[in-house]
Amino acid sequence: MSAAATPYGNVLKVGAVALAVGAAFSPGRAHAAQVTDVLDSFDGGDGFHGTFGVHYRHEQKSSRILREWVCQGGTAGSPNPLCPSGSTALDTNQLQYQETKNLLELELRAGLWRDLQLTLSLPIVVGWTSTLDHADGVSADNSLVSSPLIPSIFDVPYESASRVGLGDMVIGLDWAPIHESRSPGMPSWVIGFAYTAPTGTARKAGDTGAGGGVHAIALSTAISRRFGPADPWIKLGTTLRFPSASGPFQNERTTQTRVSPGNDIELGLGSEFHLWNSPTDEGPYLSLDVGFRSAFTFEGREYSELFDALGASGCDPSRGCTRTSLARVERGASGETLIRKSDGVTDVEQYATFGAELGVTYQPMKYLRLRLGFDYSYTTDHFITFADAGRDLDASGNVEGRNSQSVNEYNPFYNEATDAYGRRFRASASHSWGIIFGVEGRL
């Protein structure tokens, strides 16, 4: 889950955008680009400096959900025109996914010392819903997801519960070992560290929790250098995620191939342009910030587009329900099948995200700053049900319910109904956009 392609990643993204919104309020000091500007305090004759901001963000996401279908190639004299080269798995268009999120973020920034800044941000989700519907040309008559002709995985159309409440708090430190406001002719260089704590209620399918259920550590470095009215910048970062005790990402057995959401690496570059006056703490100014970002998210277990629908399915296979074949299957030591209902979290293939950002910052007076921003991102196609069958512990060449050492080698999260070749789901044509409006004042 880069922070951009998954819901947890979106919360982190809002935190990152908000960090870039403000600039230092030390009196008279000229600002660097927003991604390299930090507050400081107790520097020379100065006292404490801090800001408090409120940011509102609206997000929209849409994806096409494809499912594999095994096309039988037919015979030599009568080939199947759908797969003339022989039997193969074809991607079929099945579902249309839509997601809407609205959140309010409270952010406190404080200068601790010379070019050393502490940031505390708390997102409050005020509405977060998602829907799944049949794709164009698909109905119950030909669906591979919800149809009376096959075991139905979940009902379509599907609408999730509305998530509300506190998200996960972010605590960050930013330090500028070099800053052009102190050393003219030198670039501004900032090193950042941020920790995301699982303070929100971890998400469960069908409920209203808005937390990510993980601990996350983000490391970044950014450099900018002003050239007349332009202040170009470049930023590198990575986010590492670890399961929390309250979340769904648990390591149940050594044969489990993935546990937590995938880590990611990110590259961003852009420039701030000073449209009216140069940014300082004292006078009014207007600036425009343009940026481009790319990220790569490694394989992991995530809240995918199918999370709520899979986990909230009303059919429980352990009670003999035949409407759904979706179950988390665990084979016992004697080879027996133990069935548990899926919680909706699935293994997800690696993917890349590419995006662009546009923001306007306006400071009408010394103690007030306004920010309006827009961003767009595209996520590459990737499987969202991608679990491996397990681990071949005895090197027999097969994953077995009971191997030569009487050990169960199956992955407890592997599900033949959605993870087997020819049945997997893929997210395609994933587009996201967001609008953010922020107000920041000096404390």
Image (cartoon, grey):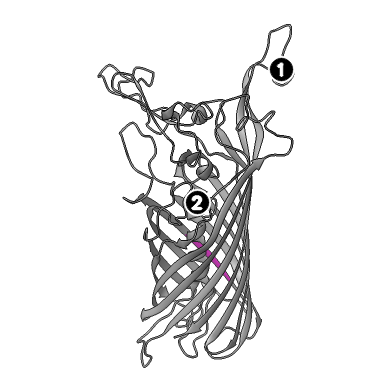
Residue 142 visible? The answer is yes
Q: Which mark is residue 2?
A: 2
Q: Helix, strand, or loop for circle 1?
A: loop
Q: Is residue 82 left or right of residue 35?
A: right
Asked whether residue 224 is in view, the answer is no
Tell me, for residue 211, which label it has, or none.
Answer: none
In this rendered view, identify the residue nearer to me: 160 or 212: 160
Q: Return the x and y of residue 92 as percentages of the image width and height.
A: 66, 31
As drawn, the residue found furthest toward the left would be 405
Magenta region: which residues?
232-236
Q: Give the vertical position of 190 relative to 385 (above or below).
A: below
Q: Position of residue 159 (x, y in %)?
A: 58, 47
Residue 222 on the magenta span: no
Residue 185 image point, x, y percent? 51, 79
Assign a secondary structure to mark 2: loop
Q: Earlier in the sequence, mark 1 or mark 2?
A: 2
Q: Is residue 235 on the magenta stretch?
A: yes
Instruction: Identify the image quadrant of the C terminus.
Output: bottom left
Where is residue 8 shown, x and y percent of the image? Answer: 47, 54
Above or below, 184 relative to 102 = below
Mark 2 packing: few (<14 Cα in 10 Å), some, or many (20+)? many
The residue nearer to you, when weighing 378 against 333, is: 333
Give the amino acid type for the residue marked by disc 1 in the picture.
Pro
**Residue at label 1?**
84
The kind of residue on which mark 2 rests is Ser
Label 1 to label 2: alpha-carbon separation: 38 Å
